[in-house]
Amino acid sequence: MSERVLRELDPEILSIASGAGTVMVSNRFQGRIFAAVAGRLLHRFDAELAAAPDPENFNNLGGNSLWPAPEGGNFAFNYPPAGEWRVLPAINCVPTGTLLEEPGRIVVSKEIELENRRGKHFRVLFRREVSAIASDDVGWTLPPELSWCGYHSIDELIPEPGIPLDAAVLAAWSLEQFPGAENIIAFGRCAGSAAGCINDDFYGDPSTRISCSGRVFRFELGGEKRLQIGVSAACAPEFIGSLDRGRGVLSMRFTPSRTDGRYINIADNDQPRGVYSAADMFSIFNGASETDFHELETIAPMGVAADGTLGASRLESTTRFYIGDGAVLEEFLRSAAGVDLRQSAKQESPGS
């Protein structure tokens, strides 16, 4: 998909330069973030749906979108007190408005109304601040064959005061969507052993597609079934990413480990052990073959106000893209970031 198509559908899209590319924020498309290099979108974008969105169903347009967590469980935002899975209109179709646009930085926001599975309605300020990363924030020295772009975002969900924690929980959750899943390898690196840091209590059984070697895990995407994993905050994960050799794109996401809140279970399941039964900082979603996309997700802890009621959730994320030949990207990932994606690498089973 080309950047031109996105700009035709949103002529007022906001943009900032970064490295060899452009980072864009769309008010029309609910504050989604998109990046492009040489006119090619790096994110997935469903232009046909964007041209004629459906207010009654989820408009899965792609890009980087900000959601309220959790998706499932007793406090779910994606399930009403009675009924089927839904995406709230506040997230699905309400546009954002520009608070600030200046060289290198964009801020958008909107006031939204949320309802959870317990029937609790409350107001929330939805705010995104996006800034371009500089050349000294690329992370590693790039070989001359590679180019880069990227951005830093501060996502905030700030609820109205006085909401008790037995009525609602809330965490900021950034879902960044990319084209394709088949033959793409996702990965992550943790401070310690990666084998015990993966939570697979989501969709399906991903265990046959996951291998671990020391601090690194490897997740082969694709196949007929949707799969998802989380990466535990307790394991101090450093980053996640995906390598699409065919497109020549290496995508990586970073978020700092936080102690000023409480991580919750974001998963789309019944959460029989409760909303605190998992505590993931990152998640990776593998779309089924008919959807043909994957997601790299960052998650903030829930905030707790001084009086013990629900507080603001603030998510800091950095996304870096490296673009070039697939083999060069794979070697760069191995030599610079210490992530070896070769099948021959020593492997352990998750949870061992």
Image (spheres, rainbow, N blue to C red):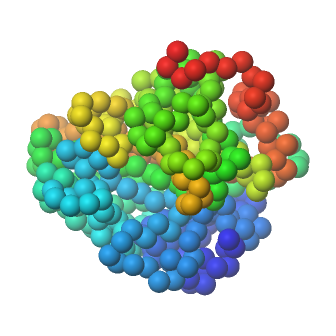
Residue at 41%, 40% (x, y): give it: 202
* Image spot of residue 122 (x, y percent): 16, 59
Classify residue 120 as left or right of residue 261.
Answer: left
* Image spot of residue 332 (x, y percent): 80, 37
Q: Nearer the viewer, residue 299 or 159?
A: 299
Outermost residue, right side = 144
Q: Nearer the viewer, residue 11 or 118?
A: 118
Quarter-wise, where is residue 123 in the image? Answer: bottom left
Residue at 72%, 18% (x, y): give it: 346
* Image spot of residue 143 (x, y percent): 86, 43
Q: Nearer the viewer, residue 272 or 139?
A: 272
Classify residue 162 as left or right of residue 135.
Answer: left
Outermost residue, top side = 352
Classify residue 297 as left or right of residue 146.
Answer: left
Question: Where is 38 relative to 209, above or below?
Answer: below
Residue at 29%, 30% (x, y): give it: 277
Is residue 105 visible in the rendered structure shown here?
Answer: no
Question: Where is 11 relative to 299, above or below?
Answer: below
Is residue 271 visible in the rendered structure shown here?
Answer: yes
Question: Which quadrant would the N terminus be assigned to in this image?
Answer: bottom right
* Image spot of residue 238 (x, y percent): 56, 31
Residue at 30%, 59% (x, y): give it: 85
Question: Where is 2 relative to 104, above or below?
Answer: below
Question: Where is 44 relative to 156, above or below?
Answer: below
The total number of labels drawn is 0
